[in-house]
Image: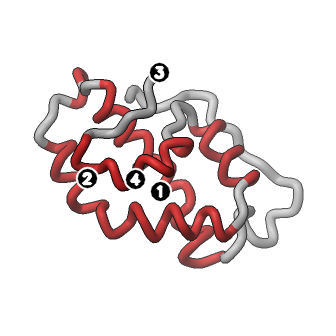
Amino acid sequence: MPTSLPSEFADLEPFSDWCLRTEAQRYAKRLSSSMDEMQAFYDAAFPRLEEILTYLDRLDLGALPPDAEQLLLLCYSLVNISFPVEVWRQARVPDSGAASLDAVIEPAV
């Protein structure tokens, strides 16, 4: 699958490795990333979130072009790292020990 984003969001292209299809992939990426990497992604993407959502809202969710689908996946990853960046300052959920939760059903998109 291509990782190109819509041209309006070319500045986010360095973070295209966060365009991951499954929750498990996004979580694994979060756990394997440093706080500096997550912070850089957050600092670049979060200020553009309203613009991204406005862009995606114009499109049919069931028929997204590949570049818009990649943008949506990028947003999913942004959600995945928001608490670690904003609140916990670590990739793992605090005080959770070895506990984990695996999604067995993915969203339709």
Q: Residues within 10 Å of mark 4 (few under 14, many from 20)?
A: some
Which-is-in-front pick, marks 4 and 2?
4
Q: Which residue is mark 2?
A: 52
Which circle, 2 or 3, is nearer the viewer? 3
Q: Which mark is residue 12?
A: 4
CA distance for labels 1 and 4 = 15 Å
Q: Which residue is mark 3?
A: 1
Give the mark nearer the N terminus: 2 vs 3: 3
Residue type marked 4 = Leu
98 or 8: which is nearer to us? 8
Residue 5: quarter of image? top left
47 left or right, relative to 22: left
In the figure, 68 relative to 18: above or below?
above
SS state under label 2: helix
In the rendered structure, which disc, 1 or 4, sits on the residue that comes first in sequence?
A: 4
Q: CA distance from mark 3 to mark 1?
A: 21 Å
The kind of residue on which mark 1 rests is: Val
State how far apart marks 2 and 3 are (Cα): 20 Å
Residue under the point 64% across and 37% down? 25
Q: How is the image coloured?
A: secondary structure
User: Could you tell me which secondary element the residue under label 4 belongs to?
Assistant: helix
Q: Amino acid at mark 2?
A: Ile
Mark 3 near mark 1, Cβ–Cβ under 8 Å?
Answer: no
Name which residue type carries label 3: Met
Direction from residue 48 to residue 14 in the image, left or right: right
Q: Do tag 4 and tag 2 residues touch (Cβ < 8 Å)?
A: no
Q: Which residue is mark 1?
A: 79
Find out whether the residues at labels 1 and 4 contact each other: C-beta distance under 8 Å.
Answer: no
